[in-house]
Image: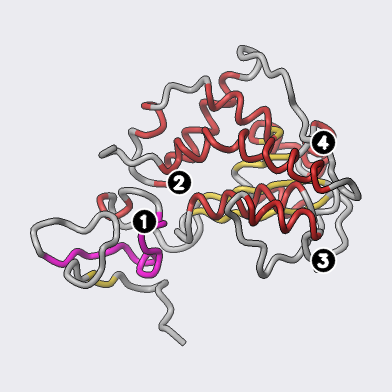
Amino acid sequence: MRASPENTGITRNPTTRGDSGVTGNGKAEIVPAGHEYCGPRCWRDVWKAPAPPEGVRFRILFVCTGNICRSPLAERLTRSALGPCPAVQVISAGTHAQPGLEMTGHARRTLVRLGGDPEGFGSRLLVPELVADADLILTATRRHRAESVALHLAAAARAFTIAEFGTLARAVPPGRITRHRDPAHRARALVDEARALRGLVRVDELDIADPYQGSRLAHRAAGRSIARALAVPLGLLTHSQDA
């Protein structure tokens, strides 16, 4: 078992590792604590930012009904895009979930087709503590958004449907997000910008249809809708400042 990366940074050797952010002058570079094993799929430019405080600093919560189709699709696609960087936690829950269930077979296969990994997933019930702790709540439908906010009223300002957030993110000037190097700062900036655009940007489709007990094609359609909605927000969060 490898040592825990939580307490100290380590030195990368650029002659043996090709990870993003290593300098090209042949010198080793100190990696912020918690990022030692992230590799090239970590948040871009993390090495150029000051070492962040230890632990999770931004939490994203996806919500649907049973937490076996839509919200785990969104959770695992987001994890795949962001990589294992510890600054941001991504989880999901269901308003009527039975804890500990795997994703449905169609949902698992859809996720794999989209580039996500379903391994190790277990459903969880949405409880007030999850909503209160989340910095961004993204729900499959308006009903899920309302049910989430009912558990913690102060979360209303940071709760959106997945499709709504994707539409609002497309209207945000990219530089307002990508100017931040720190991953948590980027995420918070994106939430603030999206919130400011509510009521100003037209959102035609707010909900992701429930594919549960539906066909393979219904699951694929839901997966594509989720992936399209998340494409711009995740692109803003992971865009390299050097690109």
- Give the residue at mark 4: 209
Q: Do the residues under discs 2 and 3 have CB atoms within 8 angstroms? A: no
Q: Do the residues under discs 2 and 1 have CB atoms within 8 angstroms? A: yes
Q: Which image quadrant for residue 76?
A: bottom right
Earlier in the chain: of badge 4 and badge 1, it is: 1
Earlier in the chain: of badge 2 and badge 3, it is: 3
- Residue type at mark 2 is Ala
Give the mark toward the camera: 4 or 1: 4
Q: For residue 32: magenta?
A: yes
Question: In x, y percent, where is residue 140?
Answer: 76, 39
Q: Is residue 31 visible?
A: yes
State the CA–CA distance, disc 4 to disc 2: 30 Å
Question: In x, y percent, where is residue 92?
Answer: 70, 53
Residue at point 61% right, 41% down?
Answer: 136
- Residue type at mark 1 is Pro
137 above or below 177?
Answer: below
Instruction: Decide which of 203, 58 is in the foreground and name it.
Output: 203
Q: Residues within 10 Å of mark 2 (few under 14, many from 20)?
A: some
Residue at point 40% right, 51% down?
Answer: 43
State the CA–CA distance, disc 4 to disc 1: 38 Å
Instruction: Decide which of 216, 21 is in the foreground and name it.
Output: 216
- Give the residue at mark 2: 184
Checking the image for residue 52, the label placed there is: 1
- Give the residue at mark 3: 101
Earlier in the chain: of badge 2 and badge 1, it is: 1
Earlier in the chain: of badge 3 and badge 4, it is: 3
Q: For residue 136: magenta?
A: no
Residue 23 is left or right of residue 90, and the answer is left
State the CA–CA distance, disc 3 to disc 4: 21 Å
Q: Residues within 10 Å of mark 3 (few under 14, many from 20)?
A: some
